[in-house]
Amino acid sequence: MAETYQRAELDRRMHGAFETLKKEFSGLRTGRASPALLDTVRVEAYGNQVPVNQVGNISTPEPRLLTVQVWDKGLAKAVDKAIRDANLGLNPQMDGQLLRIPLPELNQERRKELAKLASKYAEAARVAVRNVRRDGMDLLKRLEKDHKIGQDEHHKHGDELQKVTDAHIKEIDSALHAKEQEIMQV
């Protein structure tokens, strides 16, 4: 298969990094209950590690309360343990197959930790976007070296790729700023 420069494919990969960042941000606690908070929690069930949402219904009946209605009574203790071990600062209260998870008020120190974690996630997304740019630039160099594109076309596509990269980095930075504001508001 002949290699060709496809900006749409590189743009899609960069957008994928942003979508991953949004998913990671949704798991960060901001003081409000959100089912996405438990997205990272994995439960030992039926010999496998599965996400909590595959063993029960997660809901938010109140702004500061999550509930997990576990479908299989035998898994309720495993879900409780998984949530406690997930290092989210949550302490579920079991009531049969229903787990009530009150969200404690975030203190300033914990807010700063969460903001730092959000920054770490954003930096990982920026690195992913830059790696896609590097792959695109390497492809352009190879195509020019193999005389499949000219120098002018190489520079034109390179400038185009840089603009797309800058736009994605700006999008990541604005998402980080919004998430930091959300975390730090008291």
Image (cartoon, rainbow, N blue to C red):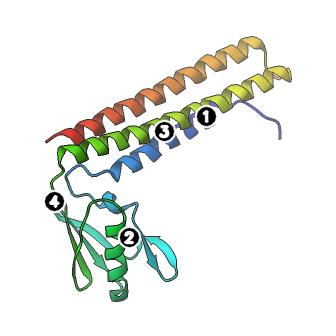
On screen, residue 142 versus residue 128, left or right, reads right
Question: Residue most toward the front?
Answer: 109
Q: Which mark is residue 64?
A: 4
First-in-chain label (2 vs 1): 2
Find disc 1 in the rendering and name its residue: 132
The N terminus sits in image quarter: top right
The image position of residue 77, as x and y in percent, is 33, 82
On screen, residue 142 versus residue 170, left or right, reads right
Q: Is residue 61 above or below residue 75?
A: above
First-in-chain label (3 vs 1): 3
Secondary structure, mark 1, is helix
First-in-chain label (4 vs 2): 2
Find disc 3 in the rendering and name its residue: 125
First-in-chain label (3 vs 2): 2
Alpha carbon distance from label 1 to label 4: 39 Å
Alpha carbon distance from label 4 to label 2: 19 Å
First-in-chain label (3 vs 4): 4
